[in-house]
Image: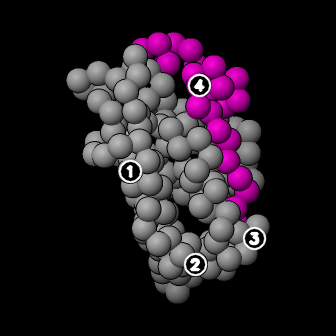
Amino acid sequence: MENNFPILERIGSSLKNNGLKLLLAESMTAGALASVISRAPNAGDFFLGSVVVYSDEMKQSALNVDSDLLETFGGVSAEVTAALIRGLQTHFPMADLLVAITGFAFECPATTAENPVGTVFIHIQLERIRYTKRYVLEGDENAIINRSIDLVLNLIGEITEHFVKGVQSKENG
């Protein structure tokens, strides 16, 4: 994993200064992303926490992901990752910046030629800004998880910066 401190400082400062609260739904990373974010200076000022929904059963019970969605698309899919965001919105309306991540860091019965090991879905939402992307990362389990965390941190930084610039433009316009 890269040295995350500079990006954590930037994210933390931006979220705190703009009164934004971050909340995660983690499947593949199983809390590892939250662990990294919690190391940011003054994380308690902007980081609400993480809901770890590793299994499909947890996706259903904790964040109300529909069983038909899971059966149709699988627990690692753009559709389910977006449903995790909707679940976060429903259960935690105090959150502003929502991040959900699902993926395959290692071989399992659900991996396929279309969704091989290294497939990762990231969905990020901050008000009207929505970002959804599928990645296929290479490496062993640790490399895939660490690269996923780096991607999410950089995306949070970019999306937050874009959002703040938009708010400032409205205030000045």
Secondary structure found at label 4: loop
Seen at 63% across and 54% down, the residue is 34
Q: Nearer the viewer, mark 4 or mark 3?
A: 4
Residue 62 placement: quadrant:
top right
Q: Which numbered disc flags the more N-terminal residue, 4 or 2?
A: 2
Mark 1 touches mark 3? (CB < 8 Å)? no
**What's the distance in space between the residues labelled 4 and 3, CA to CA?**
30 Å
Seen at 44% across and 62% down, the residue is 1
Q: How packed is label 2: few (under 14 Cα within 10 Å), some, or many (20 or more)?
A: some
Q: How packed is label 4: few (under 14 Cα within 10 Å), some, or many (20 or more)?
A: few
**What's the distance in space between the residues labelled 1 and 3, CA to CA?**
30 Å
Q: Is residue 64 magenta?
A: yes
Q: Which numbered disc flags the more N-terminal residue, 1 or 3?
A: 3
User: Which stretch appears magenta?
Assistant: 46-73
Seen at 38% across and 50% down, the residue is 143
In x, y percent, where is residue 110?
Answer: 39, 19
Q: Which residue position is annotated with label 2?
A: 9
**What's the distance in space between the residues labelled 4 and 1, CA to CA?**
21 Å
Q: Is residue 91 left or right of residue 142?
A: right
Mark 4 touches mark 1? (CB < 8 Å)? no
In x, y percent, where is residue 30?
Answer: 59, 41
User: How is the protein colored in the picture?
Assistant: one colour
Mark 4 touches mark 3? (CB < 8 Å)? no
Q: Which residue position is annotated with label 4?
A: 55
In x, y percent, where is residue 119?
Answer: 34, 37
Secondary structure found at label 1: helix
In the rendering, which numbered label is found on residue 143?
1
Q: Which amino acid is tagged 4?
A: Ser
